[in-house]
Image (cartoon, grey):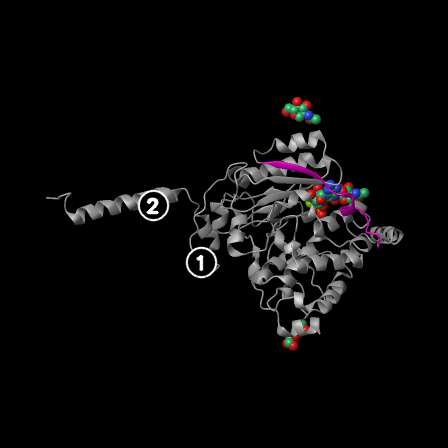
Amino acid sequence: MISFRSPLVRFLLLAIVLVGLYGLVHVNYDAASDFISSGRKRLEPYRRPVSYQPGEPKPVKACFAVLARNRDWRSLRESMKQMEDRFNHRFNYPYVFLNDEPFSEEFKNMTQSMTKAEVLYGQIPKEHWSYPQWIDQNKARERRKAMQDDGVMYGGNESYRHMCRFESGLFFKHPLMQQFDFYWRLEPGIQYLCDINYDPFLYMKERKIKYGWTIGIFELMNTVPTLWDSVKKFMKTNPELIPEHNSLWWVSRDNGTTYNGCHFWSNFEIADLSFYRGEAYSKFFDFLDREGGFFYERWGDAPVHSIAAAMFLQKEEVHWFNDIGYLHPGWQHCPSGDAWLKNRCTCDPKDTDKTITNAGWGKCSHEWELLPDTPAQFRKAIVE
Ligand SMILES: Nc1nc2c(ncn2[C@@H]2O[C@H](COP(=O)(O)OP(=O)(O)OP(=O)(O)O)[C@@H](O)[C@H]2O)c(=O)[nH]1
Ligand SMILES: *[C@@H]1O[C@H](CO)[C@@H](O)[C@H](O)[C@H]1NC(C)=O
Ligand SMILES: *[C@@H]1O[C@H](CO)[C@@H](O)[C@H](O)[C@H]1NC(C)=O
Ligand SMILES: *[C@@H]1O[C@H](CO)[C@@H](O)[C@H](O)[C@H]1NC(C)=O
Ligand SMILES: [Mg+2]
């Protein structure tokens, strides 16, 4: 007969109760972390709450950063609808909208009504959306004309250049951005193709990841004819800013002689703002800005961010969010395998018209996975 006075039986009952309580608490935590870390070095299971409320302090001071014009509100509602449904209705990270003009009441109405999270609207200071005094504006105009005649994409477009310069080196200096440590860029007219069941900001912060991406692709080289020459000049004069274990091999496969065009497609990017605010990136952007290529050519923020990440960060500090399905008109990244089913993806990984594959334009993503250490010879070649 079982006696409840027996110390053994009491101990067993207590153990059963404790195990039960442990289970109850853990149902509330997200199992996705284990899933996404498979394939990487397995980390200690991390207990993370599945949701945060609007206005509640988050484990990471982070926001969506959205550069937009007033007329973009309709396609932004599409993007926000996707972001909210796939991710943010549970996490409620705030949105920061920035514009070179004052936002209209209509824009504010039409965007804030898409989320219960906090929304902030800011105007870009004039000096962040105009010509620095060292730029020859006549030369810039002639170069735009020439690039347009040569059929360079957005080659004749002046505002596009201010946009690329702003996104390259200035957005994180806006007063509204100062309260944040991480940002996730959101553009009009994009789609999120799978559920995101965990907090990518927290994922990055825990692992000290500085830069996250989902599409790696080749650049149109006629937009950046002399960018790599400038990068090489910078590397020679600032070798102390380039760590031994960098990822430069991803952007140059010939020991630094040429740029292969690989870049992270920055219309999606999640980054630790301390990367941009730090000494290395600040010096790099100021140097490029002086070189003039944002206006005399059409340097994009994507190659600028990407070359900087390859140059200043170690491979472990850059993360491919392979499990995040994402479409920006032109290309999509569609996860395959278990993630596709589990995260309720709606894209077709075999739709090669849109889906980045291991060949052609998508080769850069694939090469990241196989990236060997940058050869010592490379370093010698660029800094000596
Ligand atoms: N405020 C403001 N935002 C701009 C301007 N030009 C572009 N943007 C924003 O900058 C981001 C990038 O512009 P996009 O037009 O999407 O450029 P893209 O992604 O290279 O090209 P497509 O999307 O293929 O047209 C978007 O968030 C735009 O809303 C501008 O002149 N003013
Ligand atoms: C903003 O929305 C409110 C109610 O939703 C409406 O009354 C108002 O007219 C709207 N304003 C503009 C400029 O769209
Ligand atoms: C310049 O580029 C933007 C895309 O960022 C586009 O919306 C706009 O129509 C272009 N302007 C001209 C004059 O081509
Ligand atoms: C890069 O340098 C290494 C070491 O000297 C050499 O073996 C390799 O062939 C070089 N690669 C290219 C593409 O120049
Ligand atoms: Mg776009």
Ligand 1 quadrant in view: top right
Eyeballing the image, is 116 above or below 187?
A: above
For disc 1, the neighbor class at 10 Å (few under 14, some 14 to 19, many from 20) is few
- Whether tag 2 and tag 1 are in contact, CB under 8 A, the answer is no
Report the disc number at residue 42: 1
For disc 2, the neighbor class at 10 Å (few under 14, some 14 to 19, many from 20) is few
Report the disc number at residue 105: none
In what element is the residue under mark 1? loop
Relative depth, front residue between 190 and 99? 99
Tell which circle, 2 or 1, labels the residue nearer the N-terminal end.
2
Q: Label 2 CB, ligand 1: below 8 Å?
A: no
Give the total number of marks visible in the rendering: 2
Q: Label 1 CB, ligand 4: below 8 Å?
A: no
Report the disc number at residue 22: 2
Residue at (57%, 59%) from the top-left corner? 317
Mark 2 or 1: the one toward you: 2
Left or right of 27: which side holds 291? right
Quarter of the figure with the N terminus: top left
Q: Name the quadrant containing residue 71.
A: top right
Q: Is residue 129 magenta?
A: yes
Residue at (75%, 41%) from the top-left corner? 100
Relative depth, front residue between 112 and 373? 112
Q: Is residue 315 magenta?
A: no
Relative depth, front residue between 174 and 302? 174
Q: Which residues are magenta?
A: 118-134
Relative image position of residue 53 (x, y in whole percent): 51, 37
In what element is the residue under mark 2? helix
